[in-house]
Structures are given as C-alpha cells and as structure tokens.
Amino acid sequence: MKFTSQHCQRILMIAAIPLLCHSPTQAQSDPEVIQRLERQLREFDATYRLAVPSDQPIAERMMLDVGGSMRIGLLGVDDENSHIRRLRQFDGILYVRGELDGTHRFFSRFRFLHNDFNEGDSFDGHYDRLEAPIADRYWYEFDSRGAELAKSGQYSDFNLNIKVGRQFLEWGSGLALSQVMYAGLVDLEIMDLGVTGLVSLTPSTGTIDFDGTRPGFHDDTDRAYYGVKLEYRGHPTHTPYVSFLAQRDHNDQDFSVFTTTLNSYPTRFAYDSEYWAIGSRGTLGPQISYRIELVHETGDALSNSYNPVTSTPIVQTTEDIQAWAGVASLSYFLLDDSNTRFDLEILGASGDDDRVAANDTFGGNTSGTRDFAFNSLGYVNTGLALAPEITNLISCRVGYSMSPQIVCLRRDAIRLGVNGFIFFKADKDAPMSFQSGTDRLIGGEIDLAMDWRISSDVNATVRYGLFLAGDAIPRENESISHYIYAGMTYAF
C-alpha cells in the first residue's frame, strides 16, 4: 500500500456558528423548520478517481486513502414563536477509500454526529444524543473500461459501470432526486450512447421527507426509486438526455389522526409519483458552461382529509398529479488571473391553489381536483436565509466570485463570492413552504461567501445570508432573516 500525507488527513473544524434569526416564517410548524434546516445544511460529498498503474504487483496497483475529520458547530434558528433554538454539534468522520487497477473502487465512511440542544430547544424532544447511522456511506464500483485499459492499454468504446451501496445520488439536475440512498446504478455506454439504470431506496434515518405531516417524516422515510436515463455522449460540447424516474411510497407509518378543538381528522398517506425529464448540459465555447432541464411530474396521491372551508372531516380520494419544474443556468469564466466567474440561474416549479399546505397531505390537495404542486426529494440552491422548497417558486439567481490578487498572499489564497436571489410565487393563490399571502413578490436575498487558504493546511470559511421580505410575506412576519456561518479547517 502507498500512503502519502494526503492519505492520512485529519480535519478539525472550529468556530462553526450558523445563526438564523428574525425569520419571516415565524408562524410555521416544527416540520417546516426541520425541513428548512435540512435544505440550509445540505452537504455534498464528492468522490474522485485515483490514477493507478496497470503493470505493477497488487501492492503497487492498490491505492488506499484513509482519513478523517472533526467538526464543532453551534446553530441558532427562530421557531414559529420567535424563540431562538440553539444546537451544539460535534461531528467526527473516519473514512477509507481505495482503488485497484482503475477497475475496482470502494469507499466507506463512519460518522459520529452528536447533537446537544439547550433545554426546551429540541424539535423532537431529544436534547442530547448520538445520531444514527454511524456507517453513513459505503459503496463498491466496478468499471469495465478501466479493466480493459489496465490490461491492454486500449480505450474501449464499450463500458459497463456498476455502483452499489449507500451513496449520494443526484438524478439529472437534482430537481427530482438529490439524496443519500441505498442504490444500485448500472451505466452502459456503447459508442456514443449511454444508458443508466437506477434502483434505490431511501435510508429510513437521515432522510427528511417532503410531507411534514406524515408520522416519522424526519426519522422514518421509506420511498423506493426506479429510473432509466438515455444520454447522447458523442458531441464534444453537449450532452442531451431524456430520463424517467418512478417514486413509490412504502412508508409503514401511513395513518394519523389530527385533533383540534372542533374535530378529529383521520388521515391516510400515499404519494406515488413519476418524473419525466428532458435536458442537456455542456459548454458554449471555451468560457461558458450551461445546464437546462424540464421535468413533468405525474402520478397519484391521496387528497386532503378535511374541507378547508367548513373544517369538517371528509373522505380522502386518490387524485392525479400533474406538475412541472425546470431549471436553466449559465456560468461564464473570465479566464483572468483572478479566476473570475459569473453565474445566472433561473428555477421554477408549479403550485396548487386549492391546497392549504404546499407539500403536505393533511391540508393538501382538494378532493376531486388534480394536484399541480411539484414535490420531490430533489434539491436546487435556493439560498441560505429563506431556503424555500421549490414548490410554487420562481427563483432568479445571479452570482459572482473571484480571487483578489494580494501582494502578501499567494495566488488564489482568498476566494470571494456573492449570490443575489429574487423570489416570486408561480401561482399567487397557491401556498408556499412558508406562510405567504396572495401577492407574487416573495422577496430578495443576498448571500456572501469567503474562503481563505491561510496556509497549505489551514483554511477559513465564512458564509452570510440576508433575506428581505416582499409583498407576499404577511405584514406581521415582515422582518429580516439572517444566516451566518464561520469555520476553520485544519488538515494534516
């Protein structure tokens, strides 16, 4: 085995202080707070391929990377009563990653995440606990093209890639699915055509469901996904594709009784959906990259269990889903000494104006009508401070980032960035994932970022988000929302 200083890396994260206060969503329920926090704290884990020689003994052909990290964090967030809830997190990670002959790859990660809430601040009554699961990522990958290249040195027009295990998946642009899953992926490439098949299941723990009224939405989610994607890979600058993804609801906790001073509302839960997508990604010349995707959601789901006008219980019915979502983005690279980059992204998704709640079954689609609200386990960047679900949202983001040339610092030591958002309602009468009125303008947000590589093994990070409410936010909730994150990384 070969080990380098990069292969035994230890990371210490300190002074991580995310703060979210004076939220315009003060009247939201705990499920909405938990779902918003999950969107704000999304972590994307990237894996990389290791180059190995093909003609060495196995001890030389095997590349092994072992490492770990430690993080200490403090989180503060407003609840619906304007009370700031505080959470301390202690996060330790150990991982091992290996590759043999460019053909067999494996990865395993163990995470020890301890959450410590102040007394009375927990959302679910658990104030001090070690979160499950401990083994949160583990997968094996086989690549036939790598095997042929290691054996003969020839690049094959045919490739079979198989990857199985608990892994992070992003289907297409991420609108329909962007989650950690138990999954099996098979990618077959013949000449210029690529076909990808997917079978996957959500981990019951660690998945925040989009339906915040379903029992166990934050710690017991069971949804299966089956998909196929067809790509044309023969063009040097464009990769167009079409895809189909089916989601099936296998949640055991599919019944609940909601009780008010007026009535009790027995409610069943079932949401089965399909996502039909067309899109493309690539470049437009040497300085511009792009992606574009349009998704049509079909399927069927159970309707609301009460009449929103009379507040009386009603019999639920199964209704059709007919929703849409789309995203288009451009990135322009100036190719100067400061590595200047500009970004433009437009995102939109449909809503349903006869719903009371945008994403839920209880308070959801009215019986006898189609459901036009787009719901999925996907993710697209909607900012730090407000972090809304994409249902019934139109978002425009403009970004700028660069590395200033400072005489006393080496090149690219500091990276500065800013993102500006403006949010609208797609249907002014449809609900959002937060409390809103019937005006279209939700508001605007500015997110700032700084990354400073102090030395080869010390890096500092700062994130700040500021949301300013628009006319769609009720007057009693019109306040400024802040999000602050600061951290330092030490690697050795």
Image (cartoon, helix red, strand yellow):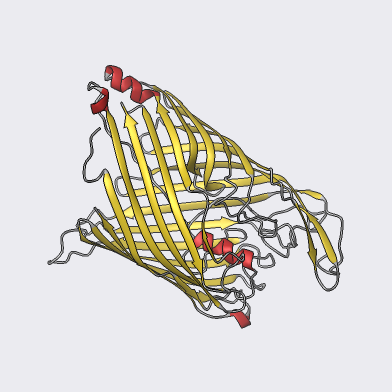
Provide residue 358's location: percent of width, then percent of height: 67, 61
Q: Is residue 286 visible?
A: yes
Return the residue found at the far bottom.
476
Asked whether residue 467 is in view, the answer is: no
Q: Quadrant of residue 447?
A: bottom left
Residue projecting furthest to the top: 152
Q: Is residue 406 left or right of residue 89?
A: left
| Location of residue 281 by image quarter | top left
Q: Which residue does the image show at 57% across and 42% down from the upper left?
A: 277
The percent coordinates of residue 148 (x first, y second) are 33, 20
Q: Is residue 167 above or below residue 475?
A: above
The residue at 47%/37% (across/down) is 240
Q: Is residue 49 above or below residue 102?
A: below
178 with respect to 221 (left or right) = left
Q: Is residue 76 above or below residue 490?
A: below
Residue furthest out toward the left: 407
Q: Is residue 69 left or right of residue 394?
A: left
From the top left corner, tell me how far across and down residue 321 is, in percent: 71, 48
Q: Residue 13, percent across and down?
A: 34, 61
Instruction: Classify the position of the N terminus by image quarter.
Output: top left
Q: Is residue 466 above or below residue 149?
A: below
- Residue in the image at 57% along x and 47% along y: 176
Label count reads: 0
- Residue situated in front as seen by the camera: 72 or 443: 72
Residue for point 86% across, 68% down:
263
